[in-house]
Image: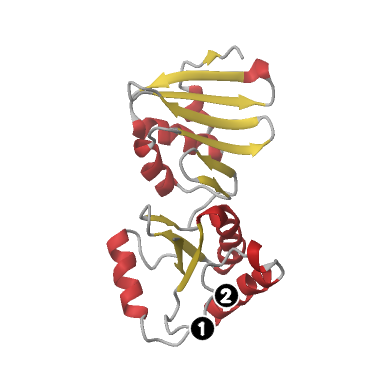
């Protein structure tokens, strides 16, 4: 059983239905240069590994008439490895990553390069406001948390508790500068995380933060 990702140009779609329509329109078109370049990079990395350690479920990647789209599959235990490489090769070429299992479109438009850990889906190299608006309301057991880290000891994180409320905390370099609050509005949580990510101190300073004892 394999896990699937699809690469497509940034900005060509914003919803899963639009993604499906775009991918349908690309069928039968010659592979673009950008797709060929990304596929070549993936194949090179995969070929450097022993066959048993490869991250491609169907090798080689690319070579199909899917126009500007690239379909890539991997074993479930290689999801993290493949996803990291997809962002490494796709983002500089202004390509988005679509996860059809989760119906997540991770588009680099307007992104901020930070380390993001999603409790249910792993690690991501950047954050956008649309991703926050999608992720925060849907945080759910067994790992209902999100962490955004700029550098060690500088991060903001939220955990959705059993009552559906959000514990939101941020840390500015040391335990003495670790504060938190509890909110019930998912949109407000997303607002504050985005404010921290973009350096908008005004929104953060309007909150009555409380020191967090660790």
The residue pinned by badge 2 equals 39
- Give percent across and percent down for residue 198: 54, 41
Q: Quadrant of residue 166?
A: top left
Q: How many numbered circles does the render carry?
A: 2
> Alpha-carbon distance for marks 2 and 1?
8 Å
The 10 Å Cα crowd at callout 2, few under 14, some 14 to 19, many 20 or more, is many
On the rendered image, what quadrant is the C terminus found in? top right
The 10 Å Cα crowd at callout 1, few under 14, some 14 to 19, many 20 or more, is some
Q: Is residue 214 above or below residue 164?
A: above
Residue located at (56% from left, 66% from top): 90
Sequence-earlier tag: 2 or 1: 2
- Give percent across and percent down for residue 58: 51, 72
Left or right of 147 in this view: 50: right
On the rendered image, what quadrant is the N terminus found in? bottom left
Q: Is residue 67 above or below residue 86?
A: below
- Confirm or deny contact between disc 2 and disc 1 (CB under 8 A): yes
Q: Is residue 159 above or below residue 209?
A: below
Q: Which mark is residue 63?
A: 1
Query: SS of the residue at dot 1?
Result: loop
- Give percent across and percent down for residue 131: 42, 47
- Give percent across and percent down for residue 108: 50, 58
Residue located at (41% from left, 65% from top): 11
Query: SS of the residue at dot 2?
Result: helix
Left or right of 176 in this view: 83: left
Q: Quadrant of residue 176?
A: top right
Instruction: Spot the residue most to the right.
Output: 48
């Amino acid at each position: 059983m394999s896990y699937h990702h699809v690469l497509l140009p940034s900005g060509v779609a914003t919803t899963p239905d639009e993604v499906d329509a775009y991918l349908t329109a690309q069928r039968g078109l010659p592979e673009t240069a950008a797709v060929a370049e990304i596929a070549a990079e993936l194949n090179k990395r995969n070929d450097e590994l022993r066959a048993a350690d490869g991250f491609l479920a169907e090798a080689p990647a690319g070579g199909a008439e899917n126009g500007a789209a690239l379909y890539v599959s991997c074993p479930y235990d290689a999801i993290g490895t493949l996803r990291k490489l997809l962002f490494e090769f796709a983002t500089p070429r202004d390509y988005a990553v679509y996860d059809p299992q989760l119906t997540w479109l991770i588009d680099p438009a307007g992104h901020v390069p930070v380390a993001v850990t999603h409790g249910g889906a792993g690690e991501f190299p950047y954050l956008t406001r649309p991703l926050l608006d999608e992720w925060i309301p849907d945080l759910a057991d067994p790992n209902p948390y999100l962490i955004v880290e700029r550098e060690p000891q500088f991060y903001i994180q939220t955990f959705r508790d059993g009552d559906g409320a959000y514990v939101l905390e941020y840390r500015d370099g040391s335990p003495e500068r670790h504060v938190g609050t509890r909110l019930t509005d998912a949109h407000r949580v997303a607002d504050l995380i985005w404010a921290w990510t973009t350096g908008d101190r005004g929104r953060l300073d309007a909150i009555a933060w409380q020191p967090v004892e660790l």
